[in-house]
Image (spheres, helix red, strand yellow):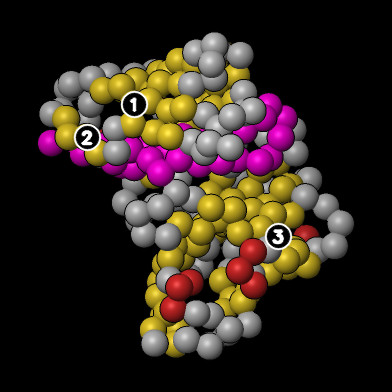
């Protein structure tokens, strides 16, 4: 069964620092990859997604992610974080043909300090 | 367009009781999925409903059941509540075969 690993459980950064959050999935084949953000008390929001094509994907709020098939990875990056980026970040995967099920990682809590 | 609405937002139940959680899907979406998010964990897929039938299920026991109505809204029912059922329950709507999931804000269930 598919599984997703997020290696950083809690990250603390100062404003303007660069961010990279790791995400690895276990099962090969054709995958669709997502990063979601959950601000305190709010619903999960889609940051970006990868289905096919250019492995460097740009999302909302200045976030981007790179799909590296050989490493089963889909790391999230942002060159300069803001205090408002404080939130929980989840990587998720579906396998093509199983659109019914998102498999999530355990999440990374990002805290941005002023 | 309206988003996904879940009710209630918070709920406290006693072990052994039964609970029903409700979800109204986003306009234009015909598929509803339910997820359980325990504290400190990522959401875990419970099941999905399409055309009023269960269309995929995760590793959850039969005491977790659901319904989908003709207007695509949905209910999640949990019988014989256990302490470990305490979690945030998320509903997500989508179009069948698509990958555009819209999540609700969730129902926080506490079992005491």
Q: Are marks 3 and 1 on the same chain?
A: no
Q: Position of residue A71 (x, y in %)?
A: 72, 65
Asked if residue A98 is positioned above or below residue B88 in the image, the reply reads: above
- The image quadrant where one finds the N terminus of chain A is top right
Using the image, name the chain to which the residue with label 1 belongs: B
Q: In this figure, which residue is indicated by the disc labeled 2?
A: B11
CA separation in Å, label 2 and label 3 = 39 Å
The answer to whether residue A98 is visible is no
Quarter occupied by residue A72: bottom right
Q: Nearer the viewer, mark 3 or mark 1?
A: 1
Callout 2: helix, strand or loop? strand
**Residue lying farthest to the front in this orientation:** B1
The answer to whether residue A94 is visible is yes
Using the image, name the chain to which the residue with label 3 belongs: A
Marked residue nearer the N-terminal end (1 or 2): 2
Callout 1: helix, strand or loop? strand
Q: Residues within 10 Å of mark 2 (few under 14, many from 20)?
A: some
Q: Residue at x 45, y 40 (%)?
A: B104
Q: Position of residue B63 (x, y in %)?
A: 34, 19
Q: In this figure, which residue is indicated by the disc labeled 3?
A: A72
Q: In this figure, which residue is indicated by the disc labeled 1?
A: B21
Q: Is residue B4 magenta?
A: no
CA separation in Å, label 1 and label 2 = 9 Å
Answer with left or right where residue B16 lies relative to residue B106: left
- The magenta-colored residue range is B87-112
**Residue lying farthest to the right in this orientation:** A53
């Amino acid at each position: 069964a598919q599984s997703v690993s997020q290696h950083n459980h809690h990250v603390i950064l100062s404003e303007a620092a660069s961010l990279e959050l790791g995400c690895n999935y276990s099962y090969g084949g054709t995958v669709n990859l997502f990063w979601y953000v959950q601000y305190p008390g709010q619903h999960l929001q889609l940051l970006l997604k990868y289905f096919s094509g250019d492995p460097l994907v740009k999302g909302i709020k200045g976030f981007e992610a790179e799909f590296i098939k050989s490493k089963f990875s889909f790391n999230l990056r942002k060159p300069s974080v803001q205090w408002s980026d404080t939130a929980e970040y989840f990587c998720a995967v579906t396998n093509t043909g199983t659109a019914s099920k998102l498999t999530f990682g355990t999440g990374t809590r990002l805290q941005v300090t002023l | 367009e309206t988003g996904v609405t879940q009710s209630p937002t918070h709920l406290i139940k006693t072990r052994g009781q039964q609970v029903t959680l409700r979800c109204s899907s986003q306009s234009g979406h015909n598929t509803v999925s339910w997820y359980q998010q325990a504290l400190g964990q990522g959401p875990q897929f419970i099941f999905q409903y399409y055309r009023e039938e269960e269309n995929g299920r995760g590793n959850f026991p039969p005491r977790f059941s659901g319904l989908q109505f003709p207007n695509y809204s949905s209910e999640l029912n949990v019988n014989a509540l256990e302490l470990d059922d305490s979690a945030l329950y998320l509903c997500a709507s989508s179009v069948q075969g698509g990958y555009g999931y819209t999540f609700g804000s969730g129902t926080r269930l506490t079992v005491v």
